[in-house]
């Protein structure tokens, strides 16, 4: 098979002049070079923040009106989407179906069909299998910005009228041209040429952290800088939940324990109960009226 001539134009496939002697480095020299390259990532992400903000506004508006968020990718890009989606239920108390992730070939690394990323029809079929509607948002993730699986998914989403966002690490990307909003983080060539799990993967992780966290904050999943909708499903998380309620309210251990018991472990209701001096039932009623927003339940 002949090399694709277009690959030479991709930002993620360029040769890094700063690391051409990588194989001749001592271990410390090698790590120092990689670390220096990693330092370039936050600056590249900062340049893309206006685009990230537009994406967050789009996603938040969709989720408020019953839509869902889908991450679609292949390889490292797809697995980063899976990681972000999997973290939403325990961190923000979301239903598992609210934020979903699709990876070309599936998520089983022992049996996944990696060749699926070359099939645009698979991207469309996988979204169809999840019952995508016009109310949903699809975020296509591809470091190169041209993965056929992601292209097919975005094209299918557009055909249904769903909102679309592209996250790429190459400028003027194919997926960017297909999407309603494009986030293109130009991190430059990798320390190891073509290994886009490095700087490109780091950039994608940072952006996905921002997308999910900022969206959930806008949906009322935070009070101040405390996550107040987390699911305390194990000992560590229960201790964290109690600690957050204590820090958010200034209440002592006995009061926090009483509030959490009265509300069935609901952090938001416990905070409203303790700060407003109301019963658990009244705290829950106020939260319902305020659409689950703690500040609204507290009166502003």
Image (cartoon, helix red, strand yellow):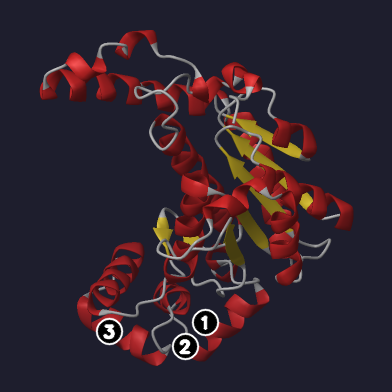
Q: Hey, which quadrant is residue 172 in on the image?
A: top right
* Secondary structure at numbered mark 3: helix
Q: How far apart are the two marked residues, 1 and 3, measured between alpha carbons?
A: 16 Å
Q: How far apart are the two marked residues, 2 and 3, measured between alpha carbons?
A: 13 Å
Q: Is residue 277 above or below residue 112?
A: below
Q: Which quadrant is home to the N terminus? A: top right
Numbered label tally: 3
Q: Residues within 10 Å of mark 3 (few under 14, many from 20)?
A: some
The single residue placed furthest to the top in the displayed view is 17
1 vs 41, nearest the viewer: 1
**In the rendered structure, which disc, 2 or 3, sits on the residue that comes first in sequence?**
3
Mark 1 lies on residue: 283
Q: Is residue 23 left or right of residue 39?
A: left
Q: Is residue 190 above or below residue 56?
A: above
Residue that appears at 55% across and 74% down: 96
Residue 209 in sight from this viewpoint: no
> In x, y percent, where is residue 69?
65, 59
Residue that appears at 50% across and 26% down: 46
Residue that appears at 39% across and 91% down: 262
* Secondary structure at numbered mark 1: helix
Mark 2 lies on residue: 280
200 vs 261, nearest the viewer: 200
> In x, y percent, where is residue 135?
80, 62
Residue 257: mark: 3
Q: Is residue 124 left or right of residue 241?
A: right
Residue that appears at 84% across and 50% down: 158
For the residues bearing labels 1 and 2, Cβ distance under 8 angstroms:
yes
* Secondary structure at numbered mark 2: helix
**In the rendered structure, which disc, 1 or 3, sits on the residue that comes first in sequence?**
3
């Amino acid at each position: 098979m002949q090399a694709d001539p277009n690959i030479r134009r991709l930002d993620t496939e360029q040769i890094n002049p700063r690391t051409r002697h990588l194989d001749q480095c001592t271990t410390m020299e090698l790590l120092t070079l990689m670390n220096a390259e990693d330092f370039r990532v936050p600056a590249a992400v900062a340049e893309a923040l206006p685009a990230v903000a537009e994406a967050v506004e789009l996603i938040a508006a969709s989720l408020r009106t019953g839509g869902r968020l889908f991450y679609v990718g292949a390889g490292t890009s797809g697995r980063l989407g899976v990681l972000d989606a999997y973290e939403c239920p325990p961190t923000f108390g979301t239903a598992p179906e609210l934020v979903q992730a699709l990876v070309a070939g599936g998520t089983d690394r022992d049996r996944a069909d990696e060749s699926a990323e070359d099939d645009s029809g698979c991207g469309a079929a996988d979204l169809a299998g999840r019952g995508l509607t016009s109310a949903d948002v699809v975020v296509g993730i591809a470091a190169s910005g041209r993965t056929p699986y992601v292209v097919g998914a975005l094209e299918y989403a557009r055909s249904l009228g769903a909102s679309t966002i592209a996250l790429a690490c190459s400028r003027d990307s194919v997926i960017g041209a297909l999407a309603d909003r494009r986030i293109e983080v130009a991190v430059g060539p990798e320390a190891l040429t073509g290994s886009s799990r490095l700087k490109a993967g780091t950039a994608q992780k940072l952006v996905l952290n921002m997308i999910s966290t900022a969206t959930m904050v806008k949906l009322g999943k935070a009070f101040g800088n405390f996550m107040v909708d987390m699911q305390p499903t194990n000992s560590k998380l229960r201790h964290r939940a109690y600690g957050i309620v204590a820090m958010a309210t200034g209440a002592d251990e006995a009061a926090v324990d009483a509030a959490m018991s009265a509300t069935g472990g609901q952090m938001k209701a416990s905070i409203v109960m303790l700060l407003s001096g109301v019963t658990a039932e009244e705290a829950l009623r106020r939260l319902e009226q305020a659409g689950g927003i703690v500040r609204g339940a507290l009166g502003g």
